[in-house]
Amino acid sequence: MVLYDAAIRVVLLAAALAILGSLSGGCRTSLRTLTPVQRGEVLYRTNCASCHGRDPNRPGALGPAIAGSPRALIAARILHRSYPAGYEPKRHTHLMQPMPWMADHIDDLAAYLSAAAADGAAMKATRNED
């Protein structure tokens, strides 16, 4: 089972890197025209969704829901595989690996996760009004 999980992670990482590689080529100019939230969504879909799920408001197969996560937590997890001082993790796992290639995009990812949390709260409020 552990070997199977490791193989899946390698395949998912290779796919994410292939997608990022294609984005950094011909689409680089168009990525610059996107808003921080839009760039963050691209980053989330290509780097995070495979573990945290397509909807950052819901837990994924391997990772917790991360919508609304503070920038300090995002940076600590992505860059150093750690937690900010005093933070109590939702899950005590060591599955997530550092992703140093995302260092310049922490603010974009934080903007997307903040917007996703707001969208999730608005959808929940709408359902409660019905």
Image (spheres, rainbow, N blue to C red):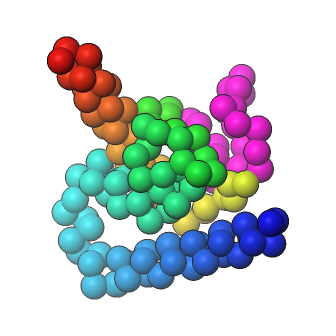
Placement of 7 over or under 91, stated as above or below: below
Residue range highlighted in magenta: 71-94
Which of the two residues, 15 or 80, is positioned nearer the viewer here?
15
Placement of 122 over or under 60, stated as above or below: above
In the picture, measured across the screen, residue 37 lies left or right of residue 88, that is left
In the picture, measured across the screen, residue 20 lies left or right of residue 41, that is right
Residue 41: % across, % down: 34, 54
Which of the 4 quarters of the picture holds residue 67?
Answer: top left
Identified at 51% across, 78% down, the residue is 15
Identified at 23% across, 74% down, the residue is 29
Residue 107: % across, % down: 42, 46
Image quarter hosting the N terminus: bottom right
Image quarter hosting the C terminus: top left
Q: Judge whether residue 2 is colored magenta.
A: no
Residue 76: % across, % down: 64, 43
Residue 45 in sight: yes
Identified at 35% across, 61% down, the residue is 42
In the picture, measured across the screen, residue 49 lies left or right of residue 87, that is left
Placement of 57 over or under 43, stated as above or below: above
What is the residue that sits farthest to the top in this orientation?
129
